[in-house]
Amino acid sequence: MTSEPHGGAAASAAAPAGGWTGSAAVLTTGERTRLVLAGEVDASMNEELATCTTEITRLGQPLDIDVRNVTFMDSSVLSVIARLSQRLTGPLRVIRPSDSVRFLLELTHLADVVEILDEDPSA
């Protein structure tokens, strides 16, 4: 499966306090779109996530959200996932969530509307 970054790709380097902030990138293949999240994904990324969401919605393909490298996730990102699950017609899959991300998905009942995959289907 070959992927190429798409116009909605965005990334951040370092937080003002010197800590790691998160990054978000939209990748596309012929059949699916992938949102790759890494680091601390939170409200400080609202603008980046809005750009990614616009691109994902425009593409209209089934979505995979790769969270294997997420170290922290807040409710603003959960809200983005919830909105995407409502906007897209194809199945939304969350790939390799950590225990803490899985807990958040279950606590908010997003685990009821997304498919959680312990392995990357494109590996």
Image (cartoon, helix red, strand yellow):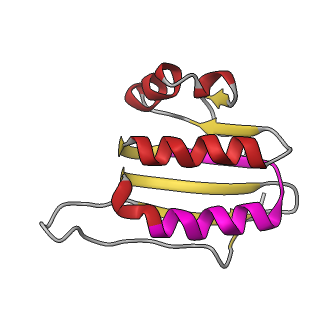
Q: Main secondary structure of the magenta part?
A: helix
Q: Is residue 114 above or below residue 106?
A: below
Q: Residue at x 48, y 26 (%)?
A: 102
Residue 46 in magenta stretch: no
Q: Residue at x 66, y 21 (%)?
A: 112
* Furthest-bottom residue in this view: 7
Q: Which residues are magenta?
A: 47-67
Q: Quadrant of the C terminus?
A: top right
How far across and how far down the image is residue 85, in percent?
A: 71, 41
Q: Quadrant of residue 95?
A: top right
Q: Is residue 3 left or right of residue 95?
A: right
Closer to the camera, 8 or 84?
84
Q: Is residue 40 above or below residue 26?
A: above
Q: Residue at x 81, y 48 (%)?
A: 62
How far across and how far down the image is residue 33, in percent?
A: 74, 57
Total count of labels:
0
Q: Quadrant of the N terminus?
A: bottom right
Closer to the camera, 54 or 102?
54
Residue 66 in magenta stretch: yes
Q: Quadrant of residue 52?
A: bottom right
Q: Residue at x 37, y 42 (%)?
A: 74
- Please say whether residue 121 is visible from this viewpoint: no
Closer to the camera, 27 or 110?
110
Q: Is residue 48 left or right of residue 18?
A: right
- Please say whether residue 59 is visible from this viewpoint: yes
How far across and how far down the image is residue 54, in percent?
A: 67, 67
